[in-house]
Image (tube, rainbow, N blue to C red):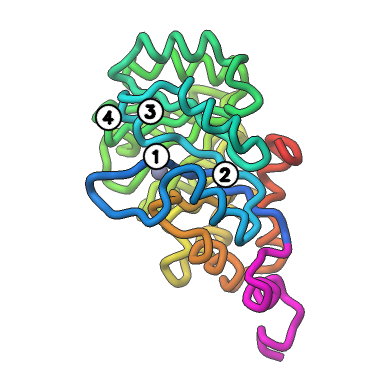
């Protein structure tokens, strides 16, 4: 029997255009970029697109908040306009220690919209092990919060062994390792397996390459993988399609698209 003849999740998406199961996209952004044209990068059109495929929640960090030209409090107001779908990471810019202290002191005010923090070490040119991140790391560890770390292979600010050192230092913080330290798959596997059980790999950019989803499921198990797209940089349909078409089990797809996140943050957080 081919995929077309079975009542698979893939077939249901292909025929209805809508995901038959919940999708939590754990890695989004918002705002335009000087480097690329985004067709949909503001809240209204993004939400419309997310609803079209059936995304349950998008957790995002605003590009301008990461750049330090917009405050997280302004992003909170955007989330409040779309309470049934948008959640945020508090953007952490290590070059603005005063913003970090102020925003984390008011973290309760951001809940339930803020679910954690977002670090962008390579873009800010500050290693995650540098003192500038310590305050936010300690705060996240104390409150057992998720932190989404941008990573990529061969970038000294977030690999070069600093991620492993960091995951071993904080046992309560929930490490969401964006892009799975792209290209350094064995090192990413070590970060999961040599941690205190508090590390998940996030799949942005992975489904676009044939065989990579299968490889990562084989290395760390689908229970350690989270779905994400970098929307608006990548499209929901391409990424969800990549997960549904990968040669993994239907159980794996359930784990990746929503089950793991529900285990961490609860249903419909
Ligand atoms: Zn990103």
Which residue is more in the foreground, 31 or 159? 31
Task: Identify the mark nearer the N-term, 1 or 4.
Answer: 4
Q: Is mark 1 within 8 Å of ligand 1?
A: yes
- Viewed as shown, does residue 105 lie left or right of 265? left
Q: Residues within 10 Å of mark 2 (few under 14, many from 20)?
A: many
Against 67, is 151 above or below?
A: below
Task: Identify the mark nearer the N-term, 2 or 4.
Answer: 2
- Magenta range is 1-20
* Residue 166, percent from left and from top: 44, 27
Looking at the image, which residue is at 39% across and 47% down? 181
Find disc 3 in the rendering and name its residue: 65
Looking at the image, which residue is at 55% across and 39% down? 59
Query: Does the magenta portion include 183?
Result: no
Q: Is mark 4 within 8 Å of ligand 1?
A: no
Q: Secondary structure at mark 4?
A: helix
Find disc 4 in the rendering and name its residue: 124
If the picture is divided into quarters, which one holds ligand 1?
top left
Mark 2 or 4: in front is: 2
Task: Identify the mark nearer the N-term, 1 or 2.
Answer: 2
- Distance between the alpha carbons at the discs numbered 1 and 2: 17 Å
- Distance between the alpha carbons at the discs numbered 1 and 3: 15 Å
- Distance between the alpha carbons at the discs numbered 2 and 4: 24 Å
């Amino acid at each position: 029997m081919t995929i077309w003849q079975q009542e698979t999740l893939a077939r249901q998406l292909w025929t209805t255009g809508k995901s038959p199961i919940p999708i939590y996209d754990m890695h989004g952004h918002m705002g335009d970029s000087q480097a690329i044209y985004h067709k949909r990068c503001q809240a209204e059109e993004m939400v419309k697109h997310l609803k079209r495929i059936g995304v349950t929640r998008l957790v995002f960090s605003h590009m301008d908040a990461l750049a330090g030209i917009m405050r997280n409090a302004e992003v909170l107001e955007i989330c409040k306009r779309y309470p049934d779908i948008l959640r945020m990471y508090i953007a952490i810019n290590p070059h603005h220690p005063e913003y970090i202290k102020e925003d984390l002191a008011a973290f309760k005010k951001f809940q339930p919209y803020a679910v954690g923090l977002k670090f962008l070490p390579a873009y800010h040119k500050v290693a995650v092990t540098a003192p500038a991140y310590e305050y936010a790391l300690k705060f996240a560890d104390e409150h057992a919060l998720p932190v989404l770390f941008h990573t990529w292979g061969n970038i000294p600010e977030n690999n070069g062994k600093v991620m492993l050192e960091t995951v071993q230092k904080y046992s309560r913080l929930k490490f969401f390792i964006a892009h799975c330290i792209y290209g350094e798959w064995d090192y990413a596997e070590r970060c999961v397996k040599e941690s205190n059980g508090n590390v998940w790999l996030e799949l942005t950019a992975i489904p676009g390459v044939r065989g990579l989803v299968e490889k990562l499921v084989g290395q760390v198990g689908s229970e350690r993988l989270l779905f994400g797209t970098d929307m608006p940089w990548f499209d929901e349909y391409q990424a969800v399609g990549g997960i549904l078409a990968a040669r993994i089990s239907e159980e794996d797809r359930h784990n990746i698209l929503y089950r793991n996140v529900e285990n961490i943050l609860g249903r419909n957080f």
